[in-house]
Image (tube, grey):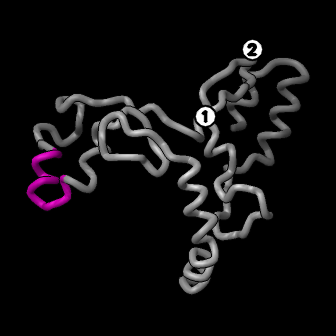
Amino acid sequence: MQDIAQTFEGSDCAANVTAAQSFRNPYWDWVVPQPIGQDTLPSSLSSPANVEVTTPSATKTIPNPLYQYHLNQLSDTQLPDYPVNLPAILLRIGLSDDIQQYSIWPDTLRFPASNHLKASSQTTAINVQLDKNQASYSKRNSNLL
């Protein structure tokens, strides 16, 4: 973060260097109950809305990286274990139906609606499940500690 902050010029540089000194990664404590009417899943994770980021040259609008990440599909020759055939290995160990779709989805998904290539995230459904099961998740998490 310090290196990035120093790429800005003038007063922006000083402000960003100061901010970078106290930077911490985003954290979401999913076991803490939310106020009534507030979704358990933060909007920063559930909203496909674009976000504005300030770069040294300009302010840019980009897709929300916390909502979805575009996965660059690799060919078999680009994989480190080439010529290993992942689908064949998954099929052999009985996991094909469970996880093979992860190798074909072009983007990360939240609570996918199906296992098909054109599956979509279900942010409303994940919020319902998180809200409904929050007390159980919290208790189980406490039991682990």
Residue closest to the far top: 57
Q: Which residue is pictured at 28% across the width and 30% down the height? A: 74
Q: Secondary structure at mark 1?
A: loop
Q: Which residue is pictured at 18% across the width and 53% down the height? A: 96
Q: Secondary structure at mark 2?
A: loop
- Nearer the viewer's eye, disc 1 or disc 2? 1
Number of labels in the image equals 2
Per the image, the residue denoted by label 1 is 48
Q: Residues within 10 Å of mark 2 (few under 14, many from 20)?
A: few
Q: Position of residue 135 (x, y in %)?
A: 63, 77
Residue 87 included in the magenta stretch of the image: yes
Give the distance between the C-alpha atoms of the residues marked 1 and 2, in whole angstroms: 22 Å
The C terminus appears in which quarter of the rendering?
Answer: bottom right
Q: Main secondary structure of the magenta part?
A: helix
**Span shown in magenta:** 86-96
Task: Say what amino acid the circle numbered 2 marks.
Answer: Ala
Give the quadrant of residue 66. top right
Placement of 133 over or under 55, stated as above or below: below
Label of residue 58 in the image: 2
Taking depth in this image into account, of 21 and 38 the one nearest to the observer is: 38
In this image, 58 relative to 30: left or right? Answer: right
Q: Position of residue 11 (x, y in %)?
A: 91, 23
Task: Say what amino acid the circle numbered 1 marks.
Answer: Pro
